[in-house]
Image: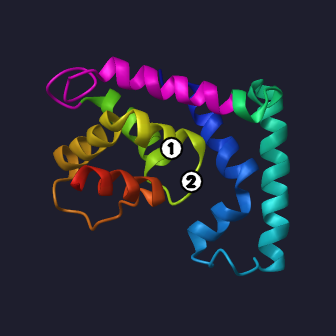
Amino acid sequence: MVSEHTVACMGYSRNVENVEYTFRAYTGIPVDSPLPLFMRLIARLVKRSTGKRLKLQGLGRHTRDEIYEIGCRDLKAIADFLGNKPFMMGDKPTTVDASVFAILASIMWIPVEFPMKSHAYQELPVLDQYLHRVRKQVWGNTVETWYTGGEEAARMYTRLDQ
């Protein structure tokens, strides 16, 4: 279900494959603008060090497609375990939900597009519904809107509204 592979797949996307886009997303630098030199240097260091760590961990020895396939299988396992339950362990949120929420929100609610995120929105909409349920149950309306599902989420919600 949620394992080190889930997090490593997400790390591969952000810090190896899309590192410059990730920097832009979190700093607000437009996609069509070049990153400042110091950010490009930091991005290279992040990419290199993350790539090395993933190879040592084992996941980095797989191809790009295999890495995302592993991550998508993890998301499917989470969705299957959740089933029709409102929360992972039943009717009320537990610490398990806090852990799963943190990982899923880091995958689905960030402004970086990658295959695991697209798979979750296209094939496993129960996960986004779960995230909203946990957020509402735990925080209610007490926090400002910080949700961003990115382009794939916008497409999904457009389809649901039709």
What amino acid is labelled 2 in the image? Glu
Q: Is residue 55 left or right of residue 79?
A: right
- Label 1: few (<14), some (14–19) or many (≥20) C-alpha neighbours in 10 Å: many
Residue denoted by label 1: 117
Q: Position of residue 82 (x, y in %)?
A: 30, 23
Determine which quarter of the picture holds residue 142: bottom left
Residue denoted by label 2: 113
- Label 2: few (<14), some (14–19) or many (≥20) C-alpha neighbours in 10 Å: many
Spatial distance from mark 1 to mark 2, Cα to Cα?
A: 7 Å
What amino acid is labelled 1 in the image? Lys
Q: Secondary structure at mark 2?
A: loop
Residue 123 lies within the magenta run:
no
Stretch of the chain drawn in magenta: 67-93
The number of numbered discs placed on residues in the rendered structure image is 2
The type of colouring in the image is rainbow
Are circles 1 and 2 on residues that touch, CB within 8 Å? Answer: yes
Q: Secondary structure at mark 1?
A: helix
Determine which quarter of the picture holds residue 78: top left
Residue 89 lies within the magenta run:
yes
Rendered-image quadrant of the C terminus:
bottom left
Q: Position of residue 159 (x, y in %)?
A: 31, 52
Q: Is residue 153 left or right of residue 31?
A: left
Q: Is residue 75 left or right of residue 90?
A: right
Which residue is at a point 71% across and 32% down the rendered structure image?
65
